[in-house]
Image (cartoon, rainbow, N blue to C red):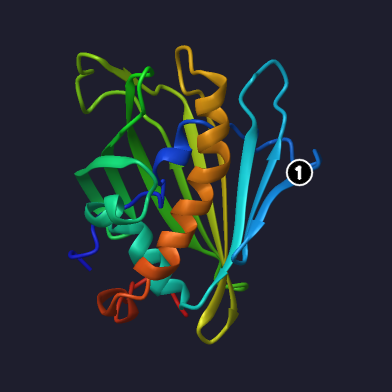
Amino acid sequence: MSKFTSSHFLFLSFILFFTSLNLASAQEKWTLSVNKEGIQVYTRPIENSKIKAIKVVTSIPATSSQLLAAILDIQTCGEWVYHSKENVLIKQVSPLDLIYYSLVDVPWPAEDRDYVVHIQAEQDPQTKVITVNSPCIPGYVEEKKDIVRISHSVGKWTITPVSKNQVKAEYVLEVDPMGNIPAWLINLFATKGPLETFRNLKVHVQKEAYKKARFKLISD
């Protein structure tokens, strides 16, 4: 499915830069910080870090393939990901295995951030749950002047089918935004960023191209 050769977000996006999640600490409790328009944003403190962890959960009227196609279409990432400025596909290993470059527009006085991500999607054949892992990787793109390169970021999407045209989408993230970030800016992107991103995603995923999307290794 060559026309769906991108990805993000479903990094995703600007939420990738101002949140941090320790994926291994599953026992730690999350605190609900935003519950609006059917979108729940959870946060929790991270040991030895001023950056809060984040988890976003919502229900989306779409099939699993439909949502996955939107996530993997990085060329349109700027249409729904908060403050996403530039997204470029670097390499397509397979329809479910991509490497891409992303640039995030960070408000003054902080500098813009960029990163290179290797995104891989797979489905559990029994439960039909789709997992999309998107760790940050070094190389591929030279560092640019006046742009801070993110060296550590691990995002994870979980797409769980609920009914024929309904899925539960969950997104969690671990990231080091690098450098000094003003507290007000951190708070802005830890709350407004996820809400805006998922609000936009719910509209974006309804494009006809995504509704028709099919993947050889993904079953709805």
Task: Point out residue 88 in the picture as x, y percentages from the top left corner.
Answer: 20, 43
Residue type, mark 1 in image:
Trp
In this rendering, the count of numbered labels is: 1
In this view, 144 is above or below 85:
above
Q: Where is 178 relative to 140, above or below?
A: above
Say which residue appears at 35% left-offset and 22% top-offset.
108
> In the depicted view, which residue is nearer to us: 174 or 133?
174
The residue located at (35%, 55%) in the rendering is 80
Direction from residue 57 to residue 73 in the image, left or right: left
- Quarter of the N terminus within the rendering: bottom left
Q: Is residue 43 left or right of residue 11?
A: right
Q: Is residue 156 visible?
A: no
Residue 76 at what x, y percent from top left?
25, 56
- The residue depicted at 22 percent of the width and 50 percent of the height is 92
Residue, far bottom: 164
SS at badge 1? loop
Quarter assignment of residue 23: top right
**Residue at mark 1:** 30
Residue 96 point in image, percent of width and height: 34, 58
Residue 159 occupies quadrant: bottom right
Packing grade of label 1 (10 A; few <14, some 14-19, many >=20) is some
Relative to 178, residue 33 above or below: below
Splitting the image into 4 quarters, where does residue 179 fall? Answer: top left
Q: Residue at x 73, y 36 (%)?
A: 25
Q: Closer to the camera, 195 or 53?
A: 195
In this rendering, is residue 38 above or below 144? below
Residue 99 visible in image: yes
What percent of the width, then of the height, locates residue 121? 43, 56
Q: Is 179 left or right of 207, judged from the image as shown?
A: right
